[in-house]
Image: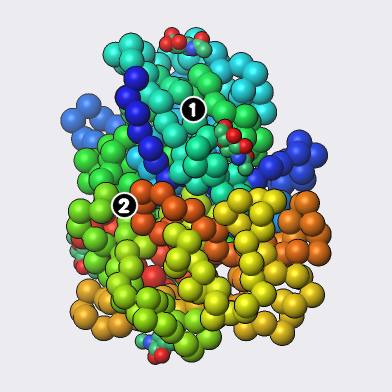
Amino acid sequence: MHLFVCLALSLVHLTLARLRELTTITLIARSLEKRGRLTRRTPRATSVPLRNYILGTDLQWYGEIQVGTPPQTFTVVFDTGSDTFGIPGKNCTSSCSNQRIFDWDKSSTYKYIDNGEGLFLQFATGVGVTPANSSDPDWMTMWEVSDTVSVGGLTVPEVPFYLIDFQSPTFGQDPFDGIMGLGTEPDSFFGSLVAQGLPALFSFYLTPHSIGNAELTLGGIDHSKFKGPMVFSPIHPNAGFWSLISNRVVVNGKTTESLSQPHRFIFDSATSNLVFPKTLTESIYSLISPDIAPNAAVPGTYGIPCRQLKSLPAVVDFTFTSTTGEPFNLTLPTTELSIGPFASNKLLCQTVINAFDFQFDPIIGGSLLKHYYSTWDAGNKTMGFAKTN
Ligand SMILES: *[C@@H]1O[C@H](CO)[C@@H](O)[C@H](O)[C@H]1NC(C)=O
Ligand SMILES: *[C@@H]1O[C@H](CO)[C@@H](O)[C@H](O)[C@H]1NC(C)=O
Ligand SMILES: *[C@@H]1O[C@H](CO)[C@@H](O)[C@H](O)[C@H]1NC(C)=O
Ligand SMILES: *[C@@H]1O[C@H](CO)[C@@H](O)[C@H](O)[C@H]1NC(C)=O
């Protein structure tokens, strides 16, 4: 078995009752013109509506895809923190009982392409806004197949992907079925579209649930979703992730020596909040309030009495450098400081940064991304951000 470790899927505990409350968003199917044998049409940019994983956290988004012939529908997290595309296969039994499973016997275009080794995948981020247990991470096993895949009306034949046949119990609580990686090197479904001429970029409009209309646009930028200019910044060339270097972190207008050092941040659409090393986490919290303290009941998390939140400013500016050399800030507003009360202590509110010391750079997820329209340009190796209202 190969051993891969990837960032991915922050999952929140979910009951089936809550799952039923989620409104279904129907994909607008745009059928492609029938392709002649010699004239393959260049794919055009398309948007996929996203549902927000609500459950009190409002920090997780996922959308629909179709797999097989005739198509079987699944929901996936579009994950910039990994390259893996996987959905449950029909031999994932009890551990996938809450998910839709792919029945390969019902697809005329299905092919088994695994070399018999399978894939073992471990996840560095934990369940929802709860940090991973670093000595007992979540994991899944899967095996490689290929089939026709459609996303947002774009259809690609013979896409290689994985079928999950076992997953650790936390994944069984997801309201979505699988994961579609959108790493810095386009591959699998998106890679095939790029090979056919789709521009090698995609964009996320990750809105709070109250605003809605969240979407992923493959191959383009939806200019109707923001007004101001978009600022682009070069991603770090060798990091293997969508990562940018920040030269300074400023909290409520103040900084410290350690916060004025360069830090490389990974941007991950599938991580719900912020996951930083302990020292960085505590440097930031120290400039917000001395009352933010680790919550021993949930290792890696921090909390503050909820009643103290009302008058507590917590504006965190991350300063990056644009492709033209100008500094720009991505700003986490005060409203993101609390991600809600802990289940085990309703008077204590969990704060936005989890501390987790692992081999990755600090990870910025939904808490910040939901305040910007973002473009992830794998062709130019840049990321673009524009403020949303
Ligand atoms: C983390 O995993 C280890 C090994 O399975 C276990 O002993 C420990 O209790 C776990 N910690 C938490 C907080 O669940
Ligand atoms: C599921 O099927 C695949 C392909 O035949 C096989 O490699 C794998 O071992 C099966 N897993 C289980 C849990 O039966
Ligand atoms: C970024 O934020 C810092 C701290 O609030 C501020 O001093 C600086 O002027 C901001 N930079 C830009 C380009 O807006
Ligand atoms: C990115 O690359 C494309 C070509 O793939 C080019 O047309 C475009 O202007 C570039 N964008 C930026 C912001 O550099």
The residue at 24%/66% (across/down) is 234
* Secondary structure type for disc 1: strand
Q: Is residue 383 visible?
A: no
**Residue 293, image x and y in percent?**
64, 67
**Figure quadrant, ligand 4:** bottom left
For this rendering, which residue is in front, 292 or 16? 292
Disc on res. 140: 1
Residue 374 sits in quarter: bottom left
**Residue 274 can be seen in this image:** yes
* Residue type marked 1: Met
Q: Disc 2 on helix, strand or loop?
A: loop
Query: Along the horizontal axis of the image, is 16 left or right of 27?
Result: right
Q: Residue at x 54, y 44 (%)?
A: 132
Label drawn at residue 380: none
The one of 146 and 89 positioned closer to us in this rendering = 89
Looking at the picture, tell me which residue is in the foreground, 308 or 267: 308
Residue 312 x %, y %: 67, 82
Q: Is residue 48 above or below residue 283?
A: above
Applied colour scheme: rainbow
Spatial CA span between label 1 and label 2: 21 Å
Which residue is disc 2 drawn over? 241
Which image quadrant: the N terminus? top left
